[in-house]
């Protein structure tokens, strides 16, 4: 329990505090359904709902107080008024658990693609150096030696600081966070001091939320502009172009430890002489910290870039360069990133599942897999509903340009008509290539058909969902795992029952 006065430390109040400052607070909540004795409810304005509509529910459930905007609700001694409750959320969430972020060395990576792989690798390098690590991100949260499910790439402040506090209790010395553009725009990491930050890539995404690419990039840049500690470390992948240059320029306000990252290109941290092989990619790595040859168990130049970014973040948090470079040879990709699906006794086709869900990511993953394909390269791809509609034609175009056959299907259609989403995606495919497109709205049937109709020497690449285990259909969320569905399709093929 933390006294209310300490929880409110640093929060500007718009009126007198009518409660006893010593009132004990155990947790901060933004969902009235989680309110109860010992909780402080913060009335956050969301994209669809306003928390002020649920203050009465939270207080009725036993919340000791509610943090609200001035003049929004009838007087009540349990209301604590502040000009912007949403802005105060990060502060009270950190205060209630004694500000654990200030006792950890923290790395953050943002980028359209690559965040999960970078965070996964950076955490592994730190662990190899003897650190105890909290890793928070898309594929789940790892609290030193305990796995927790995650609902968001970057948790909202109450959960974020509880995770860091749990990590401290388990002996954590470091943390690695995937930092989404939504989180940066909403101030979720406002109370997190980052010792090292990185931009892994930049391309079109999330314009349904940000409005345009300028606002999207501005959100990404905040990681370097606002959250990097003085004297910290920053890096950005050269391939992100102007976005990378702006990220590094923003970081230079706080530090001179700023590094560009690239593959076979002029950069501060660079991989040269790439040699692809069956198990990954070998390269000569040259950095300001040292140099050496390494064989990274990941396919493609973009994954080598991800590995270099992870290396910089790990070194920035104190890992010895030589040990970290050596440890790279023993780390694999996270779940759902070019993850192979195999069934014993079934020779082929080769099936890979990947999270690629932007035009750039689709193009890159197809280009990486292409040189390893013996027969045809087949892509199964959909686009999400209630999200950026403008990228759908570009997604279709990228798939058709990189694959020999495309199964256009659904991917979390949400409240939209999946057939219309599919048609928007196909509209971006040149007419001359549409004969290579198979339309199948049902994602399970699309995967099953792609596997059943492929030759043994073909490669089927199932894109978009990666590690995800659900499908969002209107008002229902159903269990759905591309890896499970693909394995069932392979098994059916092996038993001779595929149709």
Image (cartoon, grey):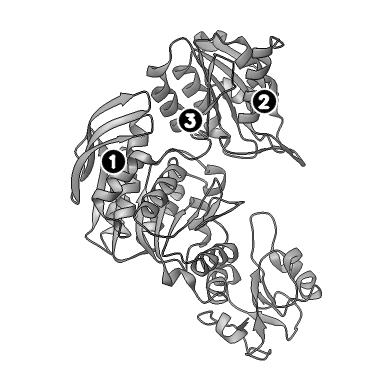
* Mark 2 → mark 1, Cα distance in angstroms: 36 Å
Which image quadrant for residue 341? top right
Q: Is residue 286 visible?
A: no
Crowding near the residue tagged with mark 3, few <14, some 14–19, many ≥20 C-alpha atoms within 10 Å: many
Residue under the point 70% across and 34% down: 416
* Residue identified by numbered label 1: 238
Residue under the point 52% across and 62% down: 188
Which image quadrant for residue 381? top right
Q: Quadrant of the N terminus?
A: bottom right
Q: Earlier in the sequence, mark 2 or mark 1?
A: 1
* Residue identified by numbered label 3: 338
> Relative to residue 146, is residue 289 drawn left or right?
left
110 shown above or below 407: below
Secondary structure at badge 2 equals helix
Q: Are marks 2 and 1 in contact (CB under 8 Å)?
A: no
Q: Earlier in the sequence, mark 1 or mark 3?
A: 1
Please identify the residue farthest to the front as the structure is shown.
345
Return the mark for residue 443: 2
Q: Where residue 101 appears, x then y in whole percent?
A: 46, 68
Secondary structure at badge 1 equals helix
Q: Earlier in the sequence, mark 3 or mark 2?
A: 3
Q: Where residue 489 appears, x then y in whole percent?
A: 66, 19
* Mark 1 → mark 3, Cα distance in angstroms: 23 Å
């Amino acid at each position: 329990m933390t006294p209310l006065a300490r929880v409110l430390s640093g929060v500007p109040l718009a009126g007198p505090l009518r409660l006893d400052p010593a009132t004990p607070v155990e947790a901060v909540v933004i969902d009235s359904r989680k309110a109860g004795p010992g909780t402080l409810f913060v009335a956050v304005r969301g994209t669809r709902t306003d928390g002020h509509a649920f203050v009465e529910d939270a207080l009725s459930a036993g919340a000791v107080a509610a943090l609200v905007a001035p003049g929004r609700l009838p007087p009540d001694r349990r209301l604590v008024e502040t000009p912007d409750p949403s802005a105060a959320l990060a502060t009270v969430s950190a205060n209630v658990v004694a500000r654990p972020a200030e006792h950890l060395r923290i790395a953050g990576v943002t980028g359209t693609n690559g965040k999960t792989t970078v965070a996964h690798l950076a955490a592994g390098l730190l662990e190899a150096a003897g650190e105890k690590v909290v890793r928070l991100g898309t594929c789940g949260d790892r609290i030193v030696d305990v796995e927790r499910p995650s609902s968001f790439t970057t948790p909202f402040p109450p959960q974020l600081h509880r995770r860091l506090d749990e990590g401290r209790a388990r002996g954590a010395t470091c943390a690695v966070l995937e930092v989404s553009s939504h989180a940066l725009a909403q101030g979720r990491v406002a109370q997190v001091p980052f010792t090292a930050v990185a931009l892994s890539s930049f391309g079109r995404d999330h314009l349904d939320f940000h409005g345009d690419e300028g606002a999207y990039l501005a959100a990404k840049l905040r990681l370097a502009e606002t959250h990097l500690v003085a004297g910290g470390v920053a890096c950005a992948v050269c391939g992100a172009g102007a976005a990378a240059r702006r990220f590094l320029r923003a970081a230079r306000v706080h530090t001179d430890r700023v590094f560009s990252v690239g593959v076979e290109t002029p950069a501060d941290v660079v991989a040269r002489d790439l040699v692809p092989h069956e198990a990954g990619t070998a390269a000569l790595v040259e950095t300001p910290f040292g140099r050496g040859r390494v064989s990274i168990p990941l396919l493609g130049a973009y994954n080598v870039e991800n590995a270099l970014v992870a290396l910089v973040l790990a070194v920035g948090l104190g890992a010895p360069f030589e040990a970290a470079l050596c440890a790279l040879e023993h780390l694999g990709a996270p779940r759902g990133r070019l993850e192979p699906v195999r069934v014993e006794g079934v020779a082929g086709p080769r099936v890979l599942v990947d999270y690629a869900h932007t035009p750039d990511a689709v193009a890159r993953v197809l280009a990486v897999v292409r040189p390893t394909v013996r027969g045809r390269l087949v892509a199964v791809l959909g686009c999400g509903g209630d999200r950026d509609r403008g990228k759908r034609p570009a997604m279709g175009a990228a798939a058709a340009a990189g694959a020999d056959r495309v199964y256009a299907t659904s991917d979390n259609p949400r409240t939209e008509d999946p057939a219309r989403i599919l048609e928007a995606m196909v509209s971006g495919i040149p007419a001359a290539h549409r004969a290579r497109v198979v339309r199948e709205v049902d994602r399970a049937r699309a995967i099953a058909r792609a596997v059943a109709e492929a030759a043994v020497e073909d490669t089927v690449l199932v894109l978009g969902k990666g590690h995800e285990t659900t499908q969002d259909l209107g008002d229902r969320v159903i269990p759905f795992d591309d890896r499970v569905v693909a394995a069932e399709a392979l098994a059916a093929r092996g038993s001779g029952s595929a149709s």
